[in-house]
Amino acid sequence: MGRVVPAWAAWAGSGRVSAEKGAGEATRANEGTADGERPDKQAMAEDRTDWAEDRTLLANERTFAGWMRTGLASCGIGLGFHAIFGKTEPLWLAKLCASLFIVIALLIFWAAFRAASRLHERLDGHAAEPVERGNLGLLASLFAVGAIVLGGVLWLL
């Protein structure tokens, strides 16, 4: 008879799970146990901790994406201010208001990367394969460059 994997050990999460560390494979808690034996409590606790770290890393990615969306919304508000108040006098006032929201977007992108990086440094992925820290930095940098270009274009209009 094959190895029985308890239901609590089949957690796959909502994120990516590597093939070599898949959720259906044996975990520390049921390695070496015969059918009907109770798994070691320490091993079960370690498994639960590993899964909690995986869930936290995946939640960190979702939070990072949320902050990126908020930064893009701030850029959109700046662009909207320029479009709505662009005909006002003095013109520099409308551009300054739009630029303020673009600077806020830059701060949001920086804060999102910083917070995501801190968590990535503290936790290790076990069954989940989180996005690498460098990719988060690349994404935040590209968004920041886009916001800076947007700000420059608004001042040139």
Image: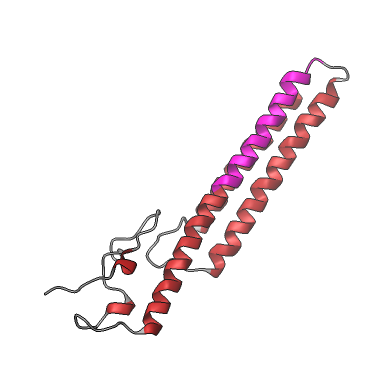
What residue do we see at 64% from left, 41% from top?
A: 71
Q: Is residue 99 above or below residue 30?
A: above
Residue 142: x and y, percent?
58, 42
Q: Main secondary structure of the magenta part?
A: helix
Q: How is the image coloured?
A: secondary structure
| Residue range (magenta) | 65-87
Camera-nearest residue between 103 and 74 = 74
Camera-nearest residue between 89 and 15 = 15
What residue do we see at 69% from left, 41% from top?
A: 105
Camera-nearest residue between 4 and 90 = 4
Residue 115: x and y, percent?
62, 58
Residue 140: x and y, percent?
59, 47
85 in magenta: yes
The answer to whether residue 71 is left or right of residue 29 is: right
Where is residue 11, by image quadrant?
Answer: bottom left
Q: Is residue 95 above or below residue 70?
A: above
